[in-house]
């Protein structure tokens, strides 16, 4: 029986070297139930017909298309509106993004107009805007509730921070979640198979369950882009196995 307490899925960035049809087939083979598409697989300037066709392919594979991202958003109102139209046409409920800070007020208008959530993704070392989930949270906490955060626990750990502490602090605005492991808690740390790294995954999952998180828990597997399936399978299996024990 599948564990329904968390919506465990994948970001299509994990299969970024493969075209959409192959990416869908890989995720179907891995029994993935939820997916967020990167623009490699569905370009942001796609026509409505192209967007609907791609969304239908995902649905026909038995996978729920949750959202898109990470989308890098300049302070450009026309571009940002186009991204929201794209998400609406595809039936997405969340856009995971890294907006320029001056663009946040317009993003705040868009989440209200389209009733689609925006989740700001932290990128750790080298990210001058949102290195940590709390950095994003502090900028949106007084905006519309649909303006939120997508904690990336790997990037958080690479800054030597406790991912659980950040989850707890931003939870009220946590609209997406990227799950991964890293081999060391330093800026040079790299993604590895979940369970082989330094993140206490049991504690992370316990925290998500305790808080009652209902959003997407998306595996973002950055390792082995030419052959990601073994690492993705191991990572998803580890999370499912851990959930079965909790």
Image (cartoon, helix red, strand yellow):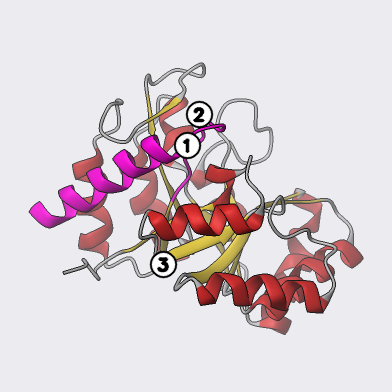
For the magenta stretch, what is the residue range? Answer: 219-246
Q: Name the residue under label 3.
A: 215
- Disc 1 designates what residue? 228
Nearest to viewer (mark 3 / mark 1) = 1
Q: Position of residue 81 (x, y in %)?
A: 82, 71
Give coordinates of residue 89: x percent, y percent.
72, 80
Task: Say which element carries label 1.
Answer: loop
Q: How crowded is mark 2: few (under 14 residues within 10 Å), some or many (20 or more)?
A: some
The residue at which mark 2 appears reads as 224
Report if residue 182 lies within the magenta region.
no
**Which residue is located at x 74 percent, y 66 percent?**
107
Q: Nearer the viewer, residue 187 or 102?
A: 187
Image quadrant in which the C terminus is located: bottom left
**Quick one: label 3 or label 2, which is nearer the N terminus?**
3
Q: Residue at x 64, y 56 (%)?
A: 20
Q: Distance between the residues labelled 3 and 2?
A: 27 Å
**Disc 2 on helix, strand or loop?**
loop
């Amino acid at each position: 029986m599948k564990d329904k307490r968390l919506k465990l899925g994948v970001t299509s960035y994990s299969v970024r070297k493969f075209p959409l049809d192959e990416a869908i087939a890989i995720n179907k083979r891995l029994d993935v139930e939820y997916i967020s598409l990167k623009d490699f697989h569905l370009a942001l300037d796609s026509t409505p017909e192209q967007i609907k066709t791609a969304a239908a392919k995902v649905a026909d594979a038995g996978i729920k298309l949750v959202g898109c991202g990470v989308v890098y958003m300049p302070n450009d109102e026309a571009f940002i509106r186009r991204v929201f139209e794209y998400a609406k046409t595809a039936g997405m409920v969340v856009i995971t993004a890294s907006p320029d800070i001056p663009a946040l007020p317009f993003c705040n208008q868009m989440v209200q107009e389209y009733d689609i959530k925006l989740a700001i993704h932290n990128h750790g070392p080298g990210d001058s805007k949102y290195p940590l989930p709390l950095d994003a949270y502090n900028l949106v906490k007084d905006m519309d509730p649909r303006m939120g955060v997508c904690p990336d626990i790997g990037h958080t750990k690479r800054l030597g921070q406790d991912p659980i502490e950040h989850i707890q602090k931003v939870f009220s605005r946590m609209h997406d979640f990227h799950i991964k492991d890293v081999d060391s808690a330093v800026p040079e740390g790299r993604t590895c198979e979940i369970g082989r790294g330094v993140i206490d995954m049991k504690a992370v999952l316990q925290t998500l369950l305790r808080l009652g998180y209902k959003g997407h828990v998306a595996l973002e597997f950055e390792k082995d882009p030419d052959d990601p399936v073994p690492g993705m399978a191991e990572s998803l299996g580890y999370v499912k196995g851990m959930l079965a024990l909790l």
